[in-house]
Amino acid sequence: FLSHRWLRGDLKQPDDEENSKYKLLMYAIDRMKLEGWLPDNDEEIAFWIDFACCDQDREPAKELNDRMSQMIGLCDFMLTPAVDKLWIEWAGERTTEQILADGHPLMSYKAEAWLVYVGRGWCRLEFWLNAYVPFRTQRAGGYGGGLGEAMMREKRRPHLLVGSREMARGELPIVLPKLDDELYRLYHPVKGELFDQKDEIVIGLNVKHL
């Protein structure tokens, strides 16, 4: 499940003119295949992406809201790409381990696109659903490395983050640690930013159903 915030929402375009987000997605897939996290056969890999999988000429928000928990429940992991051309300014030469030592990536990963993503109500709902909707652990057998280990060890659907930093450094996506009670409180979907405040009611109903 690709969980992301559109880069050009005013133009109804999820990516920028350089297709930076698409390039991040393809990099993540190829890098995980190389490391054995994903099957080597492309026919065994499929992503659910809102722009392609929801009818954009009708009411995509309504369709997504009505089926979001079901769609996330059918996916094995969630991936968020963070286009960040200024990553060197906040990350420098710090390793992923050093970044994680500063706390959960919800706060310690400082890419602007990521910070905007975790601040949005709908994005928060997606990663809440990812954490709460039951995960069928028998699927984990098809995955290897850190991705498969997270599935088996924690019996959960992992949320992965890949940014321009990881692509530039040739690194794997970051497997986000589990959310604890304090993070659930701080990143409650109803408290996130919204374009339309009426969405607060819809988001609240989704949270109530969890």
Image: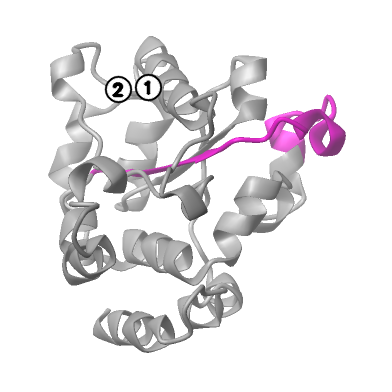
Magenta residue span? 76-98
Residue 45 in percent (x, y) is at: 21, 25
Indicate the secondary structure of the residue bearing disc 2.
loop
Placement of 102 over or under 69, stated as above or below? above
- Above/below status of 154 relative to 59: above
Q: How is the image coloured?
A: one colour
Q: Residue at x 55, y 75 (%)?
A: 192
Amino acid type of the residue tagged 2 in the rendering: Leu
Position of 38 compared to 10: left or right?
left
Residue that mark 1 sits on: 29
Q: Specify whether residue 75 is painted magenta.
A: no
Relative image position of residue 207 (x, y in whole percent): 34, 81
CA separation, marks 1 and 2? 8 Å
Quarter of the picture containing the N terminus is top left
Q: What residue is drawn where x is 39% and y is 25%?
A: 145
Number of residue marks: 2
* Residue mark closest to the camera, 1 vs 2: 1
- Kindly indicate whether the residue at mark 2 contacts the one at mark 1 (C-beta within 8 angstroms): yes
Mark 1 crowd level (few <14, some 14–19, many ≥20, 10 Å Cα): some
| Residue 38, numbered circle | 2
